[in-house]
């Protein structure tokens, strides 16, 4: 009996392993409509992103009405996970850059003029996953629907019934995340050392003491909020919609992603106008302008267009670590972050 149980268990594990293998094709792309992780499927990730940027996936590329409008990227800006730098780089190829901060204020601006966000090739949002999924995404998908559909309602209650209207209008939901311990520490440093004067009095006092032992309950509550954020992010990572591709990337992979994306966009002959680059006032970027010899540019000139290379040597949203509080996380906080760490390891494991 014991031998039979062991054999049966082994066969079940083997079948499960075979099912897992069958989920991926030989080129590493998924056979299911699950998320595409950069770490696991970098080629497919970059291809999806670049094709959306230049609309290589539209059915009629010669139709000017489709130019630049078919595919849109909706970025869920998960705080302290590289979002500010990503927004800056994307704005160079797809200006303008809208204010993505934050929560209630962002929702008010979005609801007053959703087209200002949704019509952008790349738009970014710092708010709850619930508002992102149930307000931002359905509203933008509705606004960017086929031009021959005259229903302009943005209500969320009918979203499920309206879903079939967007067939063929592929969009991307982009998510970046970060190792939970590093993200928590970065969040604390920003909270205590950046915009300190506008923080609530209680937060200022806690930051002045800068000690887990002195304010254990406060810091434990903060860790619990971090866990809740990662738990909510899991629902977004696993989101399924027939017209949406979910792309996920770890902050650690941003540098190779920028390099790979730059190469992919060069291959697709996406040109950045020099005046757009020159208008960018952010001095944190090291803008490498490269001449190319791909022939005539989009404006009819004889080549010589300028292309932006995704390179940066400084952080876009740094914290002044030692200004008020150089916080040292205790082992109790590490243990309390275990749920988030487990999710992160699941997303990043190969």
Image (cartoon, grey):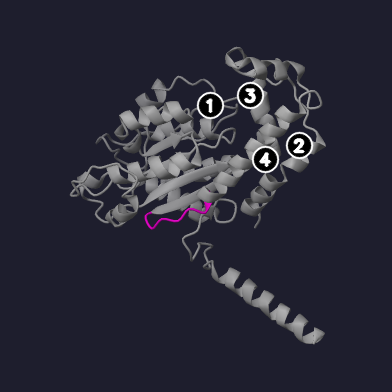
Question: Between tags 2 and 1, which lies in front?
Answer: 2
What is the spatial separation of the Cα atoms under label 1 and label 3, in whole angstroms?
24 Å
Q: Position of residue 272 (x, y in %)?
A: 37, 33
- Name the element at disc 2: helix
Residue corresponding to mark 2: 333
Instruction: Describe the element under mark 3 as helix, strand or loop.
Output: helix
Q: Position of residue 171 (x, y in %)?
A: 38, 49
Q: Earlier in the sequence, mark 2 or mark 4?
A: 4
Discs 2, 1 touching: Cβ within 8 Å: no
Q: Is residue 239 magenta?
A: yes
Q: Is residue 288 left or right of residue 189?
A: left
Q: Residue at x 70, y 21 (%)?
A: 321
Q: Nearer the viewer, mark 2 or mark 4?
A: 2
Q: Position of residue 56 (x, y in %)?
A: 34, 51
Stretch in magenta: 237-243
Name the quadrant containing residue 216.
top right
User: Are there few (<14), some (14-19), or many (20+) residues within 10 Å of tag 1?
Assistant: few
């Amino acid at each position: 009996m014991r031998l039979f149980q062991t054999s049966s268990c082994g066969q079940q594990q083997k079948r499960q392993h075979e099912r897992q293998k069958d989920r991926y094709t030989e080129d590493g792309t998924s056979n299911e409509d699950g998320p595409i992780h950069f770490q696991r499927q970098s080629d497919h990730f970059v291809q999806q992103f670049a094709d959306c940027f230049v609309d290589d996936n539209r059915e009629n590329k010669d139709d000017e009405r489709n130019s630049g409008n078919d595919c849109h990227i909706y970025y869920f800006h998960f705080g302290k996970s590289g979002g500010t730098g990503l927004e800056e780089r994307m704005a160079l190829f797809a200006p303008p850059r809208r204010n993505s901060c934050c929560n209630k204020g962002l929702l008010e601006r979005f609801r007053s003029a959703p087209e200002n966000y949704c019509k952008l090739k790349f738009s970014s949002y710092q708010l709850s996953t619930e508002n992102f999924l149930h307000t931002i995404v359905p509203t933008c998908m509705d606004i960017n629907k086929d031009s021959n559909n005259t229903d302009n309602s943005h209500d969320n209650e009918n979203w499920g019934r309206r879903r079939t209207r967007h067939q063929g209008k592929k969009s991307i939901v982009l998510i970046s995340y970060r190792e939970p311990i590093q993200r928590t520490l970065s969040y604390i440093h920003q909270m205590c050392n950046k915009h300190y004067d506008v923080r609530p009095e209680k937060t200022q006092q806690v930051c002045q003491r800068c000690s887990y032992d002195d304010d254990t309950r406060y810091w434990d509550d903060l860790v619990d909020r971090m866990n809740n954020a990662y738990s909510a992010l899991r629902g977004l990572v696993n989101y399924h919609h027939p017209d949406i591709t979910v792309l996920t990337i770890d902050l650690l992979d941003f540098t190779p992603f920028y390099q790979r994306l730059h190469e992919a966009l060069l291959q697709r002959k996406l040109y950045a106008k020099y005046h757009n680059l020159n208008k960018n006032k952010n001095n944190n970027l090291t803008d490498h302008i490269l001449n190319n010899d791909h022939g005539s540019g989009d404006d009819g000139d004889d080549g010589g267009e300028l292309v932006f290379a995704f390179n940066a040597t400084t952080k876009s949203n740094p914290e002044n670590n030692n200004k008020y509080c150089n916080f040292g996380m205790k082992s109790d906080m590490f243990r309390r972050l275990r749920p988030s760490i487990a999710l992160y390891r699941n997303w990043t494991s190969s």
